[in-house]
Amino acid sequence: MEKVEWDDVQRLVLSGYPKLPFSAYVFWHFVPGEVDAARKWLRRLSDRLTCATAHSDQHAINLALTAHGLQYLRVSDGVLNSFSLEFLEGMAPKPTAETKFPRRSNVLGDVGESSPEVWEWGGWKESRDIDGMLLLYAPDKTKLLSFIAAEIDAMAGAATPAVRQNGEPLIVDGRIYDDRKEHFGFTDGISQPLIEGSPKANGNGRKRSSDADHNKKLTSDEKRILLVKPGEFVLGYKNERRTSISDVYPERNDGSAEPQDIRRNGTYLVFRQLEQDVPAFNEFVAKTAERVYGRADEPAQEKIASQLVGRTRQGDPLVPIERPPGAAPRNDFLYYFEDRFGMACPIGAHIRRANPRDTVGPDADTALRLSKMHRIIRRGRPYGERFDTAKENAGGKQATRGISFIALNADIAGQFEMIQHSWLNNTHFGGLYSGTDPLGHFSCAGDVATIQDRPTNHHIDRPRPFVRVRGGAYFFLPGIEAVRALAR
Ligand code: HEM
């Protein structure tokens, strides 16, 4: 088994920092013409970046750069071009005379209200590309605020915080609530791939419902379903195709190799600010409960809500699987033999689309193997205040809230974009004939949510999405030595 150099990998790859529930994503531009100052800042920062082997109960800091940021640091063309096309192009390339609506926005389904034309940041109206982002994590709000202020001070002369279209500072917050629920009311962050050889996969640092199963070794089912090769998430190692990005090591014009592969121990980071319309979602759940069960009482609504997601609000999967009392929600389940026709967990439910496990492929085993080539590590968190009916009704205007969505992957096109385009946004996913992901930002004419049932399936009109993209960008989360190399 390949050993990952975890002390050179930023900790976000292994942890969502659950003990540091307050976070801020600070976006910035380098100061034009101040490359030396930028390098000095990065050099100092490199010593403070939280690496995967660090214990971080006080605070944590990680750094991500865009292609524009790398260019500013004057990496050679050979090195720059060793990064993937989608990273170089960015999440929202601007329209040109030839391409009125750029292909990437089409692929992502960033159209209509989610079009980069109307994003608050990172969209087509932007005059300057973002160069990078600091990811700051703290145990409480006061500590987070002083952390942000100190980091903005530390970047003075080298970088300046970016601003939104409306002139406000571009700092998006992220918050893990005690109940770990996102704004639609579902426990989040349950299902993650397990990186082969990582401390968690080796049984160290695993926290479950009781101390007794802490550090428990993985069962053979868990291994089969959840283990994924490190190269799917960390560049420089073998992935599920048994290849590695270092197989295409950049060469200089004179034929010699670059002194250091700055991709090594790094990964790509997808950031999307996804706004959630909670009242519209709740209204849809009530309407659907009425249609499907003939009543909109709480149990009927809870049933529908869980059928849209594929897990109950407490996180238990809908596929038939044993759950011992008091145990944490399970993640070691498959669909093909347990629930092939979606009678328990609808085929179009969010989690079944986002990770079809053993269902998309010629047979169950091959499908599971293929699905491991399309996994992402999710590190997003809710932003904004929680929905409170009384407050919202009294105030008139609806507060803004959503998910600061973060996905980590070694191949944006094959992982994040593939999930978004070919599974979440796909009206024919899993043999369905209309309808997109009920939690997705994309919908199409005649969109429906389908709930499989006997004697016939239910199709409920979903006239518009409950999620809207407000901004986003593709980043690279470099290894720590790579940050030092960039600072030289
Ligand atoms: C506002 C938008 C979103 C909300 C509210 C949301 C919510 C959730 C919830 C509640 C779960 C189940 C809990 C868990 O398994 O951890 C989940 C799982 C998941 N979501 Fe999302 N999600 C959103 C957007 C996305 C997007 C844009 C993607 C990818 C492009 C995505 C990918 C996934 C994946 C891969 C899983 C795990 C599925 C599994 O392994 O079974 N989600 N999401």
Image (spheres, rainbow, N blue to C red):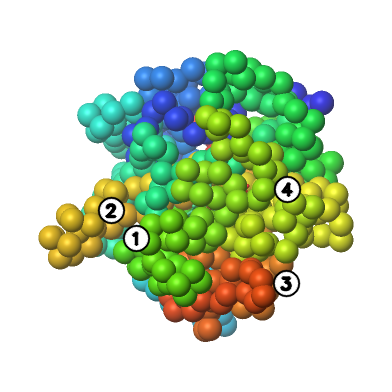
Residue corresponding to mark 4: 334
| Disc 2 to disc 1, C-alpha distance | 7 Å
- Which disc number belongs to residue 278? 1
Residue corresponding to mark 3: 431
* CB atoms of marks 2 and 4 within 8 Å: no
Q: Which amino acid does label 2 sit on?
A: Phe
- Of the two numbered discs 1 and 3 on the same chain, state the one appearing first in sequence: 1
| Disc 4 to disc 3, C-alpha distance | 18 Å
* CB atoms of marks 1 and 3 within 8 Å: no
- The x and y percentages for residue 240 are 79, 43
Relative to 201, residue 367 above or below: below
Identify the element where label 4 is drawn.
loop
- Of the two numbered discs 2 and 1 on the same chain, state the one appearing first in sequence: 1
Q: Which of marks 4 and 1 is in front?
A: 4
Identify the element where label 2 is drawn.
loop
- Of the two numbered discs 2 and 4 on the same chain, state the one appearing first in sequence: 4
Q: What residue type is labelled 4?
A: Leu
- The x and y percentages for residue 215 are 63, 17
Relative to 195, residue 341 above or below: below
* CB atoms of marks 2 and 1 within 8 Å: yes
User: Does residue 441 appear to the left or right of 283 in the view shown?
Assistant: right
On the question of residue 40 being in view, the answer is: no
